Image (tube, rainbow, N blue to C red):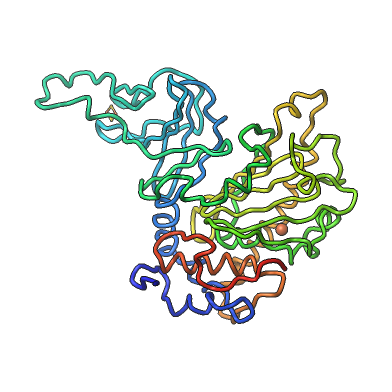
């Protein structure tokens, strides 16, 4: 049952979101504008969930590391001498200095605090702390970096800041089954773009899951994928989404819709004519193409501002081939991304107007109604729930 006291939004405003799609309302404006709602989301939806912070290849060698921010916490993801990736809070146990400020660092020995040079091993243990020997009771063995649960899946690194989300696989439910055929763990990054978008992170997530807008704002995209071809997969995890068809004769998403790149090895025939789009809460969007995988990772900065990292992953053998050039895919999606961001920024500017009286969902928007209902139920429960636990009948397909 909903626990009304935990919701950051009045439950009576969420009830209309949780009606069947034909009767449902949009998320209330507080969800898009209220700093207290965002603070609550960062704690309950991000710090208490498994959040994607990067790829394993971001820290490839012993001693290499990258930093990430989840909710209010700065984190350090380090590959140890034993090749294991570990996550720690990015803070020295002496006087609390932030240890690393760079986004990434190549292999460079132990972690040395820039303030008084306390030195930590790659496993987080305190190795040396000068001038502490006359401090009674000082126990270096208990002054290691504070660990954060970290796990990898399909090449991605996930962390759970609160340590309360159970295992990664129990959190993700059946999502690993959706990505297995595309062998995402074997793929490597060939491109990365970062965007600062003046829109709420949930509005951006909703936009990613509907193609009602495609004929209006994505003329190149609708040539390679019929905009009404999307379906929803059955889901038993914190995710929604499903496939769209490629247009006849098309083999990928690019300006031309065709490519010389081979499909991902072992991909079943039906996946060679489809692209699968998944939103995994809270912060990962995965787009599975026949020959590459695109991801967006989403980091809310303010109620109306979101940082998005978009990456393009390809099979290593494709990248090693003579003349490998991913720019058709990257430039295509970079253009589509920017079209989407502009639309979402317009929504963000308009939805707060006192002249906006509501809004209804079309038959093309049942996935985003599902997503809005998932957010609404998650507000009421105080944590992200599975999409099949929203508590309303969802119409699969469109
Ligand atoms: S704060 Fe890190 S060594 Fe002093
Ligand atoms: Fe779009």
Quadrant of the rendering where the C terminus is positioned: bottom right
Residue in view at x 37 percent, y 39 percent: 148
Q: Nearer the viewer, residue 354 or 37?
A: 37
Residue in view at x 25 percent, y 34 percent: 95
Q: Nearer the viewer, residue 89 or 232?
A: 232
* Residue furthest out toward the right: 249
Quadrant location, ligand no. 1: top left
Q: Nearer the viewer, residue 300 or 279?
A: 279
Residue 181: image quadrant is top right
Q: Nearer the viewer, residue 354 or 88?
A: 88
Q: From the viewer's perspective, is residue 141 above or below residue 155?
A: above
Direction from residue 91 to residue 194 in the image, left or right? right
Q: From the viewer's perspective, is residue 360 above or below residue 378?
A: below
Q: List x then y, in percent, for residue 88.
A: 37, 35
Direction from residue 213 to residue 357 in the image, left or right? left
Residue in view at x 45 percent, y 43 percent: 69
Q: List x then y, in percent, for residue 158.
A: 49, 41
Residue in view at x 42 percent, y 71 percent: 9
Q: List x then y, in percent, for residue 115.
A: 31, 27
Q: List x then y, in percent, for residue 386.
A: 50, 60
Direction from residue 210 to residue 152 in the image, left or right? left
Quadrant of the rendering where the N terminus is positioned: bottom left
Number of callouts? 0
């Amino acid at each position: 049952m909903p626990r009304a006291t935990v919701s950051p939004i009045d439950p009576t405003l969420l009830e209309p979101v949780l009606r069947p799609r034909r009767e449902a309302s949009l998320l209330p404006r507080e969800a898009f504008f209220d700093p207290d709602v965002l603070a609550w989301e960062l704690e309950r939806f991000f710090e208490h969930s498994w959040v994607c912070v990067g790829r394993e290849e971001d820290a490839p060698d012993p001693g290499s590391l990258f930093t990430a921010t989840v909710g209010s916490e700065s984190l350090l993801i380090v590959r140890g001498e034993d090749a294991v990736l570990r996550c720690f809070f990015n803070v020295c146990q002496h006087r609390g200095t932030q240890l690393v400020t760079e986004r990434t660092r190549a292999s460079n020995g132990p972690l040395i605090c820039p303030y008084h040079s306390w030195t930590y091993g790659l496993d987080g243990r305190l190795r040396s702390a000068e001038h502490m020997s006359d401090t009674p009771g000082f126990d270096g063995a208990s002054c290691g970096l504070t660990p954060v649960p970290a796990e990898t899946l399909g090449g991605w690194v996930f962390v759970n800041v609160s340590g309360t989300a159970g295992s990664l696989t129990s959190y993700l439910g059946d999502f690993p089954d959706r990505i297995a055929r595309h062998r995402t763990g074997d793929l490597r990054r060939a491109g990365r773009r970062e965007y600062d978008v003046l829109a709420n992170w949930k509005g951006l997530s909703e936009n990613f899951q509907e193609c009602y807008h495609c004929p209006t704002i994505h003329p190149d995209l609708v040539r390679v994928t019929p905009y009404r071809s999307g379906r929803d997969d059955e889901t038993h995890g914190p995710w929604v989404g499903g496939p769209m068809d490629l247009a006849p004769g098309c083999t990928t998403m690019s300006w031309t819709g065709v490519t010389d790149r081979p499909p991902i090895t072992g991909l079943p025939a039906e996946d060679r004519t489809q692209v699968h789009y998944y939103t995994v809460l809270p912060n990962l969007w995965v787009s599975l193409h026949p020959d590459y995988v695109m991801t967006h990772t989403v980091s809310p900065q303010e109620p109306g501002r979101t940082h998005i990292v978009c990456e393009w992953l390809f099979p290593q053998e494709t990248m090693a081939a003579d003349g490998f050039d991913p720019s058709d895919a990257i430039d295509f999606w970079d253009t589509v991304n920017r079209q989407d961001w502009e639309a979402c920024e317009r929504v963000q500017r308009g939805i707060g107007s006192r002249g906006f009286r509501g809004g209804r969902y079309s038959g093309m928007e049942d996935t985003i109604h599902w997503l809005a209902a998932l957010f609404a139920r998650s507000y009421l429960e105080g944590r992200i729930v599975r999409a099949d636990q929203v508590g309303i009948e969802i119409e699969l397909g469109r």
